[in-house]
Image (cartoon, rainbow, N blue to C red):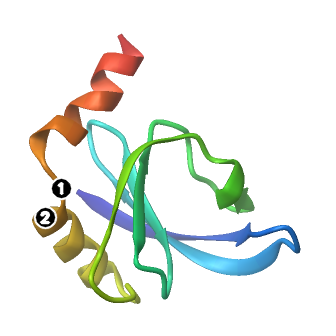
């Protein structure tokens, strides 16, 4: 799992934010720094991404806000199930 940061926006006012992205072979888990919401997508997540426009294939809510790459990795390892990791593989086929 490779975790990186990209600058993006969220909301109607296009509020600037930092997005933590965990790239895996199956897709990318991501979350806005400070959020409890972790989502998975098969879409590329690059600088300038509007997280409101990303097509998510699954997600979960972590128990507290995520602020670091390490916290994102921990949430993914403890908050996901194998079925989520198969979704993007099926969509790409």
> For mark 2, does the 10 Å Cα neighbourhood hold few (<14), some (14 to 19), or many (20 or more) residues?
few
Q: Quadrant of the C terminus?
A: top left
Q: Which residue corresponds to the image point at 21% horizontal and 30% vertical from the top-left?
A: 86
- Is 45 on the left or on the right of 22, as rendered? right
- Is 5 on the left or on the right of 60, as rendered? right
Give the farthest residue toward the right: 13
Give the vertical position of 87 relative to 29 (above or below): above
Where, by quadrant of the figure, is residue 10 drawn?
bottom right
**Residue at the spot of label 2:** 77
Give the farthest residue toward the top: 93
Residue 61, percent across and down? 34, 69
> Is disc 2 placed on a helix, strand or loop?
helix
Residue 46, percent across and down? 62, 54
The answer to the question of whether label 2 and label 1 lie on touching residues, with beta carbons closer than 8 A, is yes
The one nearer the camera, 3 or 86, is: 86
Q: Which residue corresponds to the image point at 37% horizontal and 54% vertical from the top-left?
A: 59
- The numbered dot on residue 35 is none
The one nearer the camera, 48 or 13, is: 13
Residue 35, percent across and down? 48, 81
Residue 16, percent across and down? 76, 80
- Is 74 on the left or on the right of 18, as rendered? left
> For mark 1, does the 10 Å Cα neighbourhood hold few (<14), some (14 to 19), or many (20 or more) residues?
some
Give the vertical position of 79 relative to 13 (above or below): above
Q: Which residue corresponds to the image point at 83% horizontal and 71% vertical from the top-left?
A: 14
Q: CA distance from mark 2 to mark 1?
A: 6 Å
> Is disc 1 placed on a helix, strand or loop?
loop
Q: Which residue corresponds to the image point at 13% horizontal and 48% vertical from the top-left?
A: 81
**Residue at the spot of label 1:** 80
């Amino acid at each position: 799992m490779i975790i990186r940061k990209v600058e993006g926006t969220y909301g109607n006012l296009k509020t600037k934010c930092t997005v933590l992205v965990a790239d895996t072979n199956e897709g990318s888990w991501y979350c806005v720094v400070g959020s409890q919401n972790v989502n998975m997508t098969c879409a590329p997540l690059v600088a300038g991404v509007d997280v409101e426009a990303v097509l998510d294939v699954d997600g979960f809510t972590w128990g507290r806000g995520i602020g670091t790459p390490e916290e994102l990795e921990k949430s993914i390892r403890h908050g996901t199930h194998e079925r989520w990791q198969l979704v993007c593989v099926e969509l790409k086929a």
